[in-house]
Image (tube, rainbow, N blue to C red):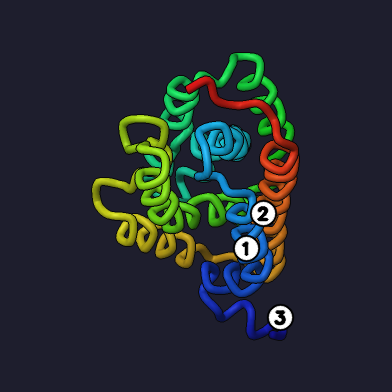
Amino acid sequence: MTSADSITVPLSRYLKEQTTSTHESLDQRIMALAPFSSHARFACFLRMQLRLHHATAPLYQQPELQALLPGLADRNRLPAILLDCVDFAISQEQQEQDRLAGQAAGPKNVAQALGWLYTHEGSTLGAAFLLKQARAELGLSETFGARHLAGHSDGRGLHWREFKQALDSLPLSAEERAEAVTGARDAFAFVRTAVEELMAGQQPGAAV
């Protein structure tokens, strides 16, 4: 795709095209590490998610991004995952490690932040499958252990479409769109690192 072509493609589609292989590889790696095989394995998955939520939580509160993406603040799921950590008795020391790891990451500018948010918000669709697995294999639910995987009251599909519409309406330059791709790729890379450290690394997790 030429730069001239890329500027006419909706940003959400462009980001998807530029990150599909990375996304698919990450999903396969996570599932290969069997996050639903035990509470201890899921706790490692939970901590990986906690790092991502800490990395993105400041973006949901950033006024400039809130102005670009209406309703952004209401999409923040960090409070839900913190409650999940309580359910799984994730220690304060472990949570602090994950908070610091998350806060050390993040985008360098607004355009990159859009890519990070695209990656994070897009995960809410896949979360439907994850929640189903967590319920079937581990007995978790939207009120215990898997709150952060719950769908929005308006429905996952509608919530995601509204986000994409806001994203696609932004008048970004070719350079800004390229920065958004960088942000999306950085977000996937951050998650992959967390997966390898916390899930493949066999870190201690659950006390339930």
> From where the camera sits, is residue 124 visible?
yes
Residue that badge 2 annotates: 188
Mark 1 vs mark 3: give the one in front: 1
Q: Earlier in the sequence, mark 1 or mark 3?
A: 3
Does 174 appear above or below 179?
below
Q: Looking at the rendering, which quadrant does residue 101 occupy?
A: top right
Mark 1 and mark 2 in contact (Cβ < 8 Å)? yes
- The one nearer the camera, 56 or 84, is 84
- Which corner quadrant of the image does residue 171 belong to? bottom right
Find the distance from the CA under tag 2 to the CA under tag 1: 7 Å
Disc 2/disc 3 C-alpha distance (Å): 23 Å
Say which amino acid is labelled 3.
Ser
Q: How many marks?
A: 3
Q: Which residue is mark 1?
A: 23
Q: Going 61% across and 77% down the picture, which residue do you hit?
A: 7
Q: Helix, strand, or loop for circle 1?
A: helix
**Image position of 42 (left or right of 136):** right
| Sequence-first disc among 2 and 1 | 1
| Front-lying residue, 42 or 164 | 42
Residue 130 on image: x %, y %: 44, 51
Mark in the foreground, 2 or 3: 2
Under tag 3, what secondary structure?
A: helix
Per the image, label 2 sits on a secondary structure element best described as helix
Q: Which amino acid type corresponds to the residue marked 1 in the rendered image? A: His
Tell whether 79 sits left or right of 178: left
Q: Which residue is mark 3?
A: 3
Name the amino acid type tagged 2: Phe
| Sequence-earlier tag: 2 or 3 | 3
The residue carrying pointer 1 sits among few (fewer than 14), some (14 to 19) or many (20 or more) residues within 10 Å by Cα, namely: some
What is the spatial separation of the Cα atoms under label 1 and label 3, in whole angstroms? 23 Å
Residue 157 in the image: above or below residue 201: below
